[in-house]
Image: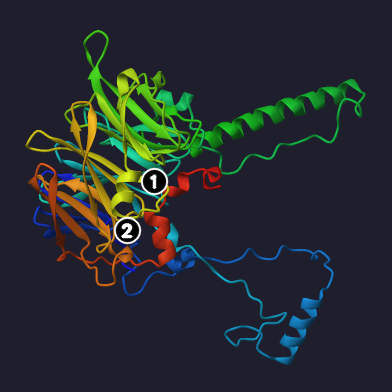
Amino acid sequence: MIVPYHLLQASGSVIFAAQGVDILSFNTSMEHLSTWKYPVKATETPSEPAADAEASATVEAPPTPEGPPAKRRRTENDEKEAQAGDAGTPNSTNGQKKGRFHNKPQPVNLSNEKPFINCLLATANGSHVVAATGSDKTIWVFEHDGSGNLKQLSQRAMPKRPCSLTLTTDQKTILSADKFGDVYALPLLPSAEPTLPPTVQSLPSRSATPASAPIPFKPQANDKTVHTKRNLKALENQKISMELSLKAAAEKSAEESQPAFEHTLLLGHVSMLTAITVAPGIGATGEKREWIITADRDEHVRVSRGIPQAYFIEGFCLGHEDFVSRLCVIPGREELLVSGGGDDDVFLWRWKEKQLLGRANILEEIKNIIEPELTKVAVSRLKGFSLASGETVVAVICEKIPAVVLFTLVEDTLKHTATYSLKEQGVPLDVELLPNNNLLVSIDTTEGKPDAAAPFLVLTRNGPDSWDQKPVVDVPAGETELNGEEMQRLLYTTESLRKMSDFD
């Protein structure tokens, strides 16, 4: 199956769409402009992949250790397999011999570890695009020429794979959050000679562990077996030398585990971190400031001060009863925040005061249109858009639910506008606002009807509470193919955040 367009990002009159490991650009008419492909080794070609790439795709079982094997009692099954192997009779479904000398280890397919793009964003002026790939833990920065063409400027491998990215209000710093619970700050454009800032050297990441811990040396002698003054002195010197060696080895391992580029550890969560965003505001003395808002699996929405005081926690927006997977600061109303996750509702907050303004039930809205027997939802996309008419629309997509739920911000409440069923088209993956105030929805057509072929759907406003649907068919199909199980692991991971006790 061809991988669908699973991430969307508008940048002026250009729409960027991530498809597996590639980034494609389109104009507002959804005409293809250009494609950035994940770089491969120079020795690889599409028709003749390199041998090392094939080797990396499979992993053989570890070799048998040297020395005599451990003794094992012979069982009845061993007797039958030995007889089948000696007689040369087939003992498997494919008719091959399967005896003592035919049970070769089967290779393990690791194609699901391809570096798929899991984060995609652009600067406010559209001059740069930032992306993150999963298995190689890399953050990519591209220069955008305004016509859809991307030029790679940097690629930086983080200690852990990023799960959420955002930019500071000055658009100069990337904030990278990983599921280990850490949030890093790194410059959008790295300096020519990057050096580790003192903050990083004094505050190492919890995820930065040495590749191989030094094996401590333990002297055979001790103060109970050594009695002469001369030998006791030698034993004491041995202990001092051992402590110094271990300390030097630990410091060297810590230095090697840190990335070589400039980055700063800002804050951390004890729980699995799931989302991050930045909200501007006014400080107590009237100066412009920004706050970092993060969410985790343990129902927390945390408000922290911005750089350089990100370690200072202002408070928590408490009210969720299940995991929080998405955060959205309302454009034009930056004092308001919408959060969603495993609960039946999305929550509207006045985040600075940690005040819950209201809840909008999405489970009931979906049950009324799509599936009356539905019992739970998991919010996979949550975005707010400011329309030219002055209205603010909040779009909600739930994982594996063939519907898009739209709300309109009316004063300090979320009013349900419409729920659009996409049963025939497939499952929506992402939504983005086009310059003409239409909404573009990317769709996983493998979950729709067999004849569903439109990877995009455009929602056009034709009234206060009404949108028309128009499929977009003439777009490149893409080249990355996955089987069904691999597709599920790539596109549908939000529900896995739900704690197992909630399934009982």
Q: Residue at x 84, y 69 (%)?
A: 73
Task: Classify 94 as above or below 138.
Answer: below
What separation in Å lies between label 1 and label 2 (alpha carbons)? 22 Å
Q: Which numbered marker is on residue 245? A: none
Query: How packed is label 2: few (under 14 Cα within 10 Å), some, or many (20 or more)?
Result: many
Q: For numbered disc 2, what is the local secondary structure?
A: loop
Task: Classify 484 as above or below 138.
Answer: below
Query: How packed is label 1: few (under 14 Cα within 10 Å), some, or many (20 or more)?
Result: many
The quarter holding residue 60 reads bottom right
> Which residue matches tag 2?
20
Mark 1 or 2, nearer chain start: 2
Can the viewer see residue 155?
no
The quarter holding residue 480 reads bottom left
Q: Which numbered marker is on residue 378? A: 1
Q: Residue at x 42, y 51 (%)?
A: 493
Q: How is the image coloured?
A: rainbow
